[in-house]
Image (cartoon, rainbow, N blue to C red):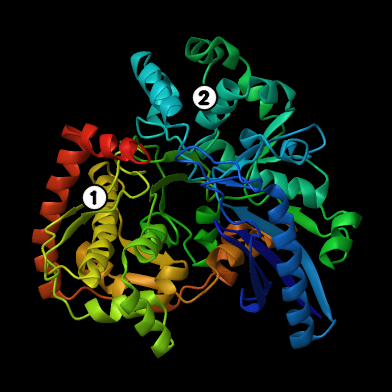
Amino acid sequence: MKTVALGIDFGTLSARAVFVDAADGSVLASADAPYRHGVMSESLPSGESLPLEYALQLPDDYVDAMTRVVREARAALQSRVGDTVDIIGIGTDFTACTVFPVDEDGTPLVEKYPERRHAYAKLWKHHAAQDKADKINALAASRNEPFLARYGGKVSSEWTLPKIWEVLDEDPALFDEMDLWVEASDWIVWRLTGVYTRNASSAGYKGFFQDDLGYPSDSFLKALDPRLTGVFAKMGGPILPQGSAAGRLTEQMADTLGLPAGIPVAVGNIDAHVAFPAVGIGGPGEMLIIMGTSSCHIIVDEHLRIVSGMAGVVRYGVLPGFYAYEAGQASVGDMFQAFVDHFVPASYTKEAEARGLSIHQVLREKCQDQKPGQSGVLALDWWNGNRSVLVNAHLSGALLGLTLQTAPEDIYRALLEATAYGTRMIVDNYEAHGILVKRIVATGGIAAKDPLMMQIYADVLGREIRVASLAQGPAAGSAIFGTVAAGHCSIAEATGRMGHTAGTVYRPNEAERARYAELYQDYVWLHDVLGRERPDLPEKYRQLRGG
């Protein structure tokens, strides 16, 4: 009988499920499906318009997509290996911080109040609470609050406290009615097991819980807004380390998913973090880049270091025995898609259709032979603000060097380069604070599908980049944690046995590397002028959007 584990990855736009062989981590079956309502950034399903910087979702879409992908992957598994399989564990991961209000049994309040925007899930890229984050940062800095340093000196509007304060400020009645304010990662595990637990990763990076500091103090919360006093009680639940078992699959959910009841289910996890063991990283020196709609840059170290501009550091937040550091870029795949949606002429779309290619493939083809700087355009990749190292969601992107001869592929190439420059800023910042980046591993859809972009990254960073051969890194990582939660092995053992260390290696071209090193200094100059000296300018023009 083959022993397998199920991993379920909840991304920004879709869910995917994989069954992996618990002996070697090989993927035996997989499936993916989009969320029915996608991301709501302009209006609710009723048609009611939303303010700027909103990104909402329906929790019911998560269960619906999970049901479809698990059943489809289960059928594919059965077709491949027959019925003689033992599903020993289930693991899940989720975008974070994606949060919403529920009642005491976990029912999302949006089911009762579909007309109230604050009842919906606030997706990680919901930035409408930036004014709250600004106030948190200012007060915490003035009081020398100890928690602030653990988040690089600034907290993001993407995290849980700004978002729950937004609900309290704009819909206090809804705030009073909700029993719990939950991370989607914990809620989906609650649905699967009937037991509410919280995972240490989300609680630490997004919920401001540090095992040696606890939560920010009530005196700090009271100084922010007296109504926030005791707000962390709204989070509730025991906080469990990664790889722990939250409970077992209920009869009801087993029937829904077409699985046997009683399978151990791991506590939730963050989508970017869960891929660590899947790509075979088990200790310091190796940075993982997860590349998708946004990018995250994760590395572990044996010591606690305070890194300005990081998204957070949490002890045992990713792997036991290490402090795990997170940084990231708020817009990567999202930025490329926005450019395609709004700035590419119809003639390019017609060409793509005629050739049976995506518009992204056409644009990459047109710019792939350009040398560094040949586009004549320098870009700032802040189309969804800056997560690291400036930590400012108010910032907006910029293009320098446009002329009457600039073509769409020139701008597209500049955007590719800008994300590579942004990643180098993060790597340089880690190393400036004593966290050495000896190797880089990349995973995610972009890393697997775009050799041009990966070569640009290798040239800009001046380092080898290994793209993990595993196509579904987060989902496979979740399956690994499901195996651990079942008591089958430790995280270290699972990483050694089930992790995939093979993959395509991109090596820097020396001539390109040298040229990019010069151009990178121009990016740093523009980054610092508009991000540090005059952030009011990109902030102003972001605020002017929509009148």
Position of residue 168 relative to residue 284, above or below, is above
- Name the amino acid, label 1: Asp
Q: Residue at x 51, y 53 (%)?
A: 273
Q: Pointer 2: what residue? A: 213
Q: Secondary structure at mark 2?
A: loop
- Name the amino acid, label 2: Leu
Give how far across and how far down residue 332 sits, in percent.
Answer: 37, 58
Q: Residue at x 38, y 40 (%)?
A: 546
Give how far across and how far down residue 402 sits, in percent.
Answer: 13, 60
Position of residue 503 relative to residue 428, above or below, is below
Numbered circle sitting on residue 428: 1
Left or right: residue 516 versus residue 398 is left
| Residue 210 in view in this figure | no
Nearer mark to the viewer, of 2 and 1: 1
Q: Nearer the viewer, residue 357 or 246?
A: 357
Which quarter of the picture shows residue 38?
bottom right
Position of residue 409 relative to residue 532, above or below, is below
CA gap, disc 2 to disc 1?
28 Å
Give how far across and how far down residue 325 sits, in percent.
Answer: 41, 45
Q: Residues within 10 Å of mark 1 (few under 14, many from 20)?
A: some
The answer to whether the residue labelled 2 contacts the one labelled 1, judged by CB atoms less than 8 Å apart, is: no
Give how far across and how far down residue 283 sits, in percent.
Answer: 44, 56
